[in-house]
Amino acid sequence: AQSVTQPDIHITVSEGASLELRCNYSYGATPYLFWYVQSPGQGLQLLLKYFSGDTLVQGIKGFEAEFKRSQSSFNLRKPSVHWSDAAEYFCAVGARGTGNQFYFGTGTSLTVIP
Amino acid sequence: NAGVTQTPKFRVLKTGQSMTLLCAQDMNHEYMYWYRQDPGMGLRLIHYSVGEGTTAKGEVPDGYNVSRLKKQNFLLGLESAAPSQTSVYFCASSYRGAPYEQYFGPGTRLTVT
């Protein structure tokens, strides 16, 4: 069965520091992988996605993620965090079957210290 | 384009009452979804639709019904609300097939007392 694990419930970083949010997935085939961001009281916005090809993908707002098949991971990174990056981040795996269903992790809440 | 919109934004129900949440999208997407978001549990799929007139169950369908009479609209119904259905509900839509991303609405916060 498909599943996504985000091991870190909450992360605190200083503004300007680097960031890495972890995501591990379980899926029987090559996965489709996504990172979404949710600001307080808002819906989810797509940051980036991986379907195939280059395993390092670039997204919006300076984020990038690397797909590592051997580790079943799709970690999100940013070299220098801004205060406006404080939000909840969700990793998702898309199933290839009917309906383009997504399976979401439980999320990582990011706090940025000035 | 408005994208995905949800009505209402907030609602308080008493146990046993019924209500319908409306989702509308103007992107001509074939697929639509209803999720619920609870603290520490991420988003869980309630029901989804792959086209007008078709619906299917997701991970947590009990206590909910859905209808997709028009391509642009996806309705989520609670026939007899329970406190366990207190949650934030998100609608999403996507193009047919994979691996298209899902586009999300702003959410509806529902409290059942």
Image (cartoon, rainbow, N blue to C red):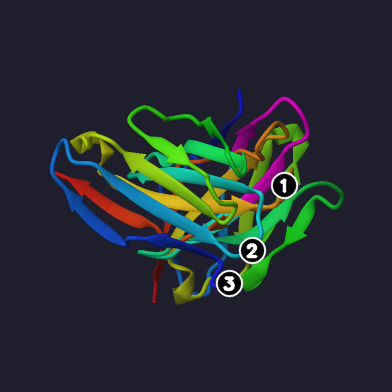
- Label whose residue precedes the other's in the sequence (2 or 1): 2
Using the rendered image, report if marks 3 and 2 lie on a common chain.
no
Quadrant of the image occupied by residue A110: bottom left
**Magenta segment, which residues?**
A24-34
User: Disc 3 is attached to a residue of which chain?
Assistant: A
User: Disc 1 is attached to a residue of which chain?
Assistant: B
Q: Quadrant of the C terminus of chain B?
A: top left
Using the rendered image, report if marks 2 and 1 lie on a common chain.
yes
Q: To which residue does mark 3 refer? A: A80
Asked if residue A72 lies left or right of residue B84, the reply is: right
User: Disc 2 is attached to a residue of which chain?
Assistant: B
* Closer-to-camera residue (B65/A6): B65
Q: Position of residue B49 (x, y in %)?
A: 57, 40
Mark 1: which secondary structure?
loop
Q: To which residue does mark 1 refer? A: B96
* Residue A103 at least partly seen: no
Asked if residue B95 lies left or right of residue B46, the reply is: right
Alpha carbon separation for disc pair 1 and 3: 36 Å
